[in-house]
């Protein structure tokens, strides 16, 4: 356990004797041993006592005289999560914006890092902050989420997730941010009758190499990717009679075989503009668009993000009864810089639970289930398709059920890895079972 954190927790407990000495010893013994202390008195009972005491101290304002680490993170995440985190508190300042890497935890499969960004002289940081170019050395599959924003100090607190496995344990890593977006706006496009803007099948198309694009998304994307090449619309001059916007223009719309294509070109001044079109019929049923991104040199498609083609699967002439609408997001600010911190990523000592688990997931079959403090991981073989995400719940011995909503997937060389994240740390000794698509797996 970090000596400074132990010292300060000891100060709280020592100056405010709300705990028995035996509980104090058990608390630090458990933290030092990764929460593995086992006695007749349950871990949950005495740990809860300690956590409640700490929360009382923090809520009373006592902790404000000490390090901001404990005071802030207990209020933002949870006492349970704060006890798992290893304090870092490394800072980097560039162009009057301060980044602080506050704390982190790594469970052998995934690292979670808490970072703050504060504008020391302006309003470039707000609640819509979105990291654009950032990385953690030795890791992959990054994502970030703003979990709090302080309007007074112009400070955003972010939760960064990165998958890297055991290779990160105990290693020095570098976390860096090179650009971010903020001041975002949302745009809703009113519905338009498809029959009034679509007269005939697409007359001119171009070939798109699906192995030479930066990506896409939606239910159809994987099947499009597997085709290796597809036909997309020939970009035309601006067609602002469909939707008039400053950040994009609809350059073509048409049918290619049994799919409706809506093509847009982005204004380069609006970095990372994005969104989605929706088709809705008279009954209210809707179809969400899939998409592919590409560039165009005047005659052929190229690698790039200048264009996005939104694609719907439609049947026969039924598309004429649909209405087209859209929801999009633009960023008013794109800020570049050089913010970086280097620190050792400590491994969480709490052991993981692994068990055999075989289930057909629709396109792939799982064979192993792993439970760790940050969530649940399923591993198997096959090909994962969007829209086939399994439902995962963790059932505790007290009857409480925790639903794991957020997930990430890796699908490479026939191997599928799906990571389901828990909003709160999981205490492994309190878990009774994991429920996947209604099938309950008892944990022994």
Image (cartoon, rainbow, N blue to C red):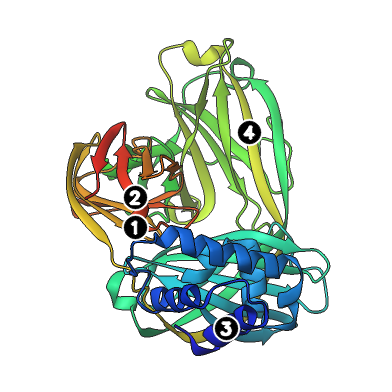
Q: Earlier in the sequence, mark 2 or mark 4?
A: 4
Picture residue at 59% right of the left edge, 39% below the top: 251
**Alpha carbon of mark 3 to alpha carbon of mark 4: how far?**
55 Å
Q: Which of the numbered marks, if any, corresponds to residue 10? A: 3
User: Picture quarter containing residue 224?
Assistant: top left
Q: Is residue 95 above or below residue 366?
A: below
- Check if mark 3's residue and mark 1's residue have beta carbons within 8 Å: no
- Total marks shown come to 4
Give the structural element (helix, strand or loop) at label 1: helix
Q: Is residue 47 above or below residue 433?
A: below
User: Picture quarter containing residue 146?
Assistant: bottom right
- Check if mark 2's residue and mark 1's residue have beta carbons within 8 Å: yes
Q: Earlier in the sequence, mark 2 or mark 3?
A: 3
Determine whether, in the image, residue 67 is placed left or right of residue 210: right
- Check if mark 1's residue and mark 4's residue have beta carbons within 8 Å: no
Q: Which of the numbered marks, if any, corresponds to residue 428? A: 1
User: Picture quarter containing residue 347?
Assistant: bottom left
Between marks 3 and 1 in the image, the one whose residue lies nearer the viewer: 3
Give the percent coordinates (x, y) of residue 434.
31, 43
Q: Earlier in the sequence, mark 3 or mark 4?
A: 3
């Amino acid at each position: 356990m970090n000596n400074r954190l132990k010292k300060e927790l000891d100060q709280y407990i020592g100056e405010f004797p709300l705990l028995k000495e035996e509980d104090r010893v058990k608390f630090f013994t458990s933290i030092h041993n990764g929460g593995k202390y086992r006695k007749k008195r349950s871990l949950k009972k005495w740990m809860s006592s300690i956590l409640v005491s700490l929360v009382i101290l923090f809520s009373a304002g006592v902790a404000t005289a000490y390090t901001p680490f404990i005071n802030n993170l207990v209020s933002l995440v949870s006492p349970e999560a704060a006890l798992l985190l290893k304090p870092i508190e490394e800072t980097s300042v560039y162009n009057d914006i301060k980044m602080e890497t506050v704390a982190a935890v790594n469970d052998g499969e995934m690292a979670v890092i808490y970072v703050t960004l504060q504008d020391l002289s302006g309003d470039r940081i707000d609640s819509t902050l979105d990291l654009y170019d950032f990385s953690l050395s030795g890791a992959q599959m990054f994502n970030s989420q703003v979990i709090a924003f302080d309007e007074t100090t112009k400070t955003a607190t972010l939760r960064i997730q990165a998958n890297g496995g055991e290779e990160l344990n105990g290693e020095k890593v570098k976390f860096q941010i090179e650009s971010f977006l903020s001041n975002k706006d949302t745009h809703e496009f009113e519905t338009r009758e498809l029959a009034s803007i679509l007269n005939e099948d697409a007359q001119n198309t171009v070939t798109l190499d699906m192995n030479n694009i930066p990506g896409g998304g939606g239910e159809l994307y994987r099947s499009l990717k597997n085709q290796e090449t597809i036909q997309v619309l020939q970009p035309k001059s601006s067609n602002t009679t469909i939707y008039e916007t400053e950040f994009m223009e609809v350059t073509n719309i048409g049918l290619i075989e049994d799919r409706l294509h809506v093509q847009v070109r982005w204004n380069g001044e609006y970095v990372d503009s994005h969104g989605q079109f929706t088709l809705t019929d008279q009954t209210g049923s809707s179809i969400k668009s899939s998409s592919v991104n590409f560039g165009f040199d005047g005659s052929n498609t190229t690698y790039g993000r200048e264009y996005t083609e939104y694609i719907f699967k439609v049947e026969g002439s039924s598309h004429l009864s649909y209405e087209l609408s859209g929801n999009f997001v633009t960023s008013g600010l794109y800020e570049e810089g050089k913010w970086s911190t280097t620190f050792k990523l400590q491994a969480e000592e709490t052991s993981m639970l692994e068990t055999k688990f075989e289930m057909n997931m629709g396109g792939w079959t799982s064979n192993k289930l792993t439970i760790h403090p940050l969530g649940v991981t399923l591993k198997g073989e096959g090909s994962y398709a969007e829209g086939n995400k399994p439902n995962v719940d963790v059932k505790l011995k007290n009857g409480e059920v925790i639903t794991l909503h957020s997930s990430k997937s890796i699908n490479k060389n026939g191997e599928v890895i799906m990571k389901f994240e828990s909003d709160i740390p999981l205490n492994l000794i309190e878990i009774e079972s994991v429920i996947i698509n209604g099938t309950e797996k008892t944990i022994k």
